Image: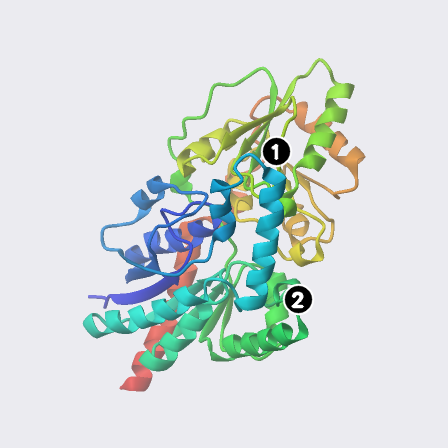
Amino acid sequence: MTKRRRLLMIAYYFPPMGMGGVQRPLKFAKYLPDLGWDVTVVTPQPGEYFAKDETLLDDLPESVEVVRIKSLDPSPPRKLREYVPDNPLLYRGVSMLVEKMQRWARWPDGKIHFSRVAAREAMRLFDDQPFDAVYTTSPPPSIHMAGQRVQSELRIPWVADFRDPWLVSADDWGPTRIHRNRAETLRARFLDHADHILAMNDLVADTFNTVTPLRGLSIIPNGYDEADFADVNSPKAEGDFVIAYYGTVSAQTDIQPVLDVLDEFTARHPERPVRLKHIGTTVGMEAISHPAYESLGYLPHKEAIAQLCGADAVVITLDSDPGLRMTIPGRTYEVLRTLRPILVIAPESSILSQVLLPFHGVWTCDCSDRESALNALDQIQRLGHRAVVRDINSIRRFDRRAQTFQLAGVLDDLAASEEKESE
């Protein structure tokens, strides 16, 4: 009989919190028990957060233990809504000021208290039920401090997972040279001590490799869960040309270039009504007013998938900020799985454009190249309603279950090596 092992997973963003960042640890926790790894998740108690999805908890097997702990989570910008609910410009200005102050006062991020409390909780849990490995996933970057402490004190292997390229982009290192120096030291410490590093793409991995020799490195991108697409109940087909925009609208994912393209497209094709359905939240932006725009708000994950599959095309945008060039939004792979045409409006040099370009049914356009975006929409609308434009076998490697096999292999190797050394 194969020995079962137990993984300690420390994740700040975890259901019932919503948004894309919770999907990766959630799906790992969902599928690891099938591969011989029982999971204990340490995460904050549910608190104030702008997106929640209780339905995500249905994904967790009964064997997964979720330990929720109290944490001082500074979130005054969101609480300001109680005082300036009808003044979005004032809310945005005060939020930016508070966040800037936090960047000076709290380092490496505002979740540092959770990292400390989570490490202490891990010690307590270990006394009752030992762990064979610890896994931490960022953001927030301070989460890896907990992983390193657990590794050091409990003498168990540590896997550090970087969902976003923190400590790769200099823009994330803090407001001063002092912050940067500390960040460089912390980066080297994480990379030097972690038994295995997970990176979300080749560009991030290559940057890590230039810093220090790593004990182990695996590239596991974000992905999609095939189970989320089973029995999808999409809305009835409409006569309009329906384009879905999936994810948060913010300064980093500006939707205005899409609206500008739609204005021009409508002027050229007045006979073909266009609708842009936004599935997600709007953060730090004024309310969007446009005749083609419809906000569905933040939906439970299964409903969001249904809306995506019910669209004729999906658009993904990425700002030209250099710090985002290594970013691939987590929703990207679910969009690929819809098999619908995809229009990407992002810098040509971005890893997002480079990763998606080889797939069938994907049109990539630079943020400043409106004519290319218009030509892409012309081609897409001629495909007809809800056209299937790519073979699902071309994206199987992004299935969350397959990715969990990869993580389980890493954990098995680390645990076996640790057991051999202790004999």
In x, y percent, where is residue 335?
54, 39
Residue 199 vertical position relative to residue 189 in the rendered view, above or below: above
In x, y percent, where is residue 318?
66, 46
Residue 103 in view here = yes
In x, y percent, where is residue 93?
63, 47
Q: How many residues crowd mark 1 within 10 Å: few (<14), some (14–19), many (20+)?
A: many
Residue 29 found in image quarter? bottom left
Q: Residue furthest front?
A: 83
- Specify the quadrant that holds the N terminus: bottom left
Is tag 2's residue or tag 1's residue first in the polypeptide sequence?
2
Which numbered disc covers residue 249? none
Q: Nearer the viewer, residue 349 or 3?
A: 349
- Residue 257 horizontal side relative to residue 159, left or right: right
Describe the element under mark 1 as helix, strand or loop.
Answer: loop
Check disc 1 and report the residue beneath it. 341
- Residue 154 horizontal side relative to residue 86, left or right: left
- Specify the quadrant that holds the C terminus: bottom left
Measuring 58% from the left and 73% from the top, which residue is drawn there? Answer: 183
Q: Residue furthest top?
A: 271
Alpha carbon separation for disc pair 2 and 1: 34 Å
Which numbered disc covers residue 170? 2
Q: Which residue type does callout 1 highlight?
A: Pro
Q: Disc 2 vs disc 1: Cβ atoms closer than 8 Å?
A: no
Q: Nearer the viewer, residue 130 or 2?
A: 130
Q: Which residue type does callout 2 highlight?
A: Ala
